[in-house]
């Protein structure tokens, strides 16, 4: 772990704005991550789980028909093929294993769309840990199949009935519960929150970039000119970007949810429409009003629908090392269809934002080698896509 990647500060961003009552738990986790988490024994055990259970390495696929259509050389990093259908299991397995080695027997987690809850419940079933997942009741209604999955996997789902009753409120509730239950581990789902979470989660996701960089060199014979990923909290993107930060010629592009457009305010594009501030223990770019009240967010994809972005992205943006753009709902839906028809891959709506950006920028990207992170598969999104198109449930 080098200094740039270990936190608590990413430039002026990050930190640990947490109540005194949480500091002991955060420090205990930081200590475990810096010692046992860096040990050869831990690394070997996690690598074994990722390989034999989760299905790593995931492939790098040349997107031949999409490339012909767009006039660039597109490569897809296939996190959609990881067990449970998205990159989230990399982090859930890593943290659950660390917690288990710390002697923890109970895991707390938040979930929005349910993907992180499913990944956490999966890791807990595998490792024999008790699992409690906090989920806003609005999200629970929208994501019933994932609720059932979590319960099937042995997790207890606690519905959160305050605030907007979505992800932000579920994180508040999980943090509050952790304060009163320091014997538990809180398994946060993205590269955000108070230190050590941004560094810890990025550390577990950087396997994506390590593999992808090696694979693209082997298969394409050269580095990509552009690396693209969608950015919700920012964990799949930072997991990919870290491997390329020192490759000066490689452009890094994060794509946020442009929703119905930045001007109308119904979006989740923190860098386009936000300001720096503090949420969930972390100083970073947020969607907030002049009084610092957190604004409601909107995206067609639940996984990008969060008012703050991970602090390492805020630093990469401040340093000019990465740029952050937005893709609107309509373009993401078009990309969803396009990849299905041209490559036989149904992408997650989140990942469709990265693809949508590539499709919109096709003129700029002509002739370039472009690496796109396919963070997850889209089976979970079929009902919402059909509902949007007025076709009812499939
Ligand atoms: C949750 C999720 C995301 C967004 O989270 P990040 O932390 O920004 O990666 C992106 N893609 C998929 C498939 C997801 O499930």
Image (cartoon, rainbow, N blue to C red):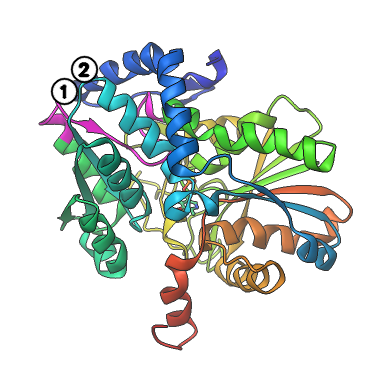
Q: Check the image and report above or below for 42 versus 80.
A: above
Residue at the bottom extreme?
Answer: 391
Return the residue at label 2: 24
| Residue 360 seen by the camera | yes
The circle on residue 385 is none
Which circle, 1 or 2, is nearer the viewer? 2
Q: CA distance from mark 1 to mark 2?
A: 7 Å
- Place of residue 199 in the rendered image (x, y in percent of width and height, measured from the top left): 45, 26
Q: Which image quadrant is residue 148 in?
A: bottom left
Is residue 206 shown in magenta?
no
Badge 2 crowding class, 10 Å Cα cut-off, few under 14, some 14 to 19, many 20 or more, is few
On the image, the x and y values in percent for residue 372 come to: 67, 50
Q: Residue at x 49, y 60 (%)?
A: 267
The yes-or-no answer for disc 2 within 8 Å of ligand 1 is: no
Residue 93 as seen in the image, left or right of residue 9: left
Q: Which residue is mark 1?
A: 21
Q: Residue pushed farthest front?
A: 52
In the rendered image, the residue lying farthest to the left is 180
Read off the magenta span. Answer: 178-197
Q: Could you tell me if residue 224 is visible in this image? A: no
Q: Marks 2 and 1: in contact by CB < 8 Å? A: yes
- In the depicted structure, whether residue 343 falls above or below residue 25: below
As helix, strand or loop, the secondary structure at mark 1 comes to: helix
At x 41% / y 60%, what residue is drawn? 302
Q: Residue at x 37, y 41 (%)?
A: 189
Quick one: 315 or 390, which is closer to the camera? 390
Instruction: Assess whether residue 195 is covered by the magenta stretch.
Output: yes
User: Chief secondary structure of the magenta span?
Assistant: loop
């Amino acid at each position: 772990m080098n200094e740039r990647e270990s936190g608590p500060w990413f430039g002026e961003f990050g930190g640990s704005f947490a109540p005194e009552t949480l500091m002991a738990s955060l420090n205990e986790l930081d200590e475990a991550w810096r010692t046992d988490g860096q040990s050869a024994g831990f690394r070997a055990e996690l690598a074994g789980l990722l390989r034999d259970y989760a299905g790593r390495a995931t492939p790098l696929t040349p997107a031949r028909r999409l490339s012909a259509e767009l006039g660039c050389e597109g490569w897809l990093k296939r996190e959609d093929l990881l067990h449970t259908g998205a990159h989230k299991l990399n982090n859930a397995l890593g943290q659950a294993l660390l917690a288990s080695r710390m002697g923890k027997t109970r895991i707390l987690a938040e979930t929005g769309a349910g993907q992180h809850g499913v990944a956490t419940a999966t890791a807990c079933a595998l490792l024999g840990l008790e699992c409690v997942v906090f989920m806003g009741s609005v999200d629970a209604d929208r994501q019933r199949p994932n609720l059932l999955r979590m319960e099937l996997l042995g997790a207890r789902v606690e519905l959160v009935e305050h605030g907007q009753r979505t992800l932000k409120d579920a994180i508040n509730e999980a943090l509050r519960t952790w304060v009163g239950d320091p014997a538990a581990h809180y398994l946060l789902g993205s590269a955000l929150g108070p230190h050590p979470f941004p560094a810890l989660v990025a550390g577990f996701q950087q396997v994506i970039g390590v593999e992808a960089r090696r694979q693209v060199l082997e298969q394409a014979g050269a580095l990509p000119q552009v690396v693209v990923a969608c950015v919700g909290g920012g964990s799949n993107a930072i997991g990919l970007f870290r491997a390329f930060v020192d490759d000066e010629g490689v452009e890094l592009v994060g794509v946020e949810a442009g929703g119905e457009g930045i001007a109308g305010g119904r979006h989740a594009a923190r860098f386009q429409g936000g300001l720096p501030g503090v949420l969930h223990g972390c100083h970073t770019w947020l969607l907030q009003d002049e009084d610092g009240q957190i604004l409601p967010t909107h995206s067609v994809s639940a996984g990008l629908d969060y008012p703050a972005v991970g602090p390492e992205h805020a630093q990469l943006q401040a340093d000019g090392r990465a740029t952050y753009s937005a893709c609107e709902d309509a373009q993401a839906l078009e990309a969803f269809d396009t990849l299905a028809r041209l490559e036989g891959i149904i992408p997650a709506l989140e990942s469709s934002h990265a693809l949508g950006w590539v499709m919109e920028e096709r003129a700029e990207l002509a002739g370039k080698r472009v690496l796109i992170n396919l963070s997850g598969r889209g089976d979970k999104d079929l009902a919402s896509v059909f509902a949007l198109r007025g076709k009812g449930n499939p």
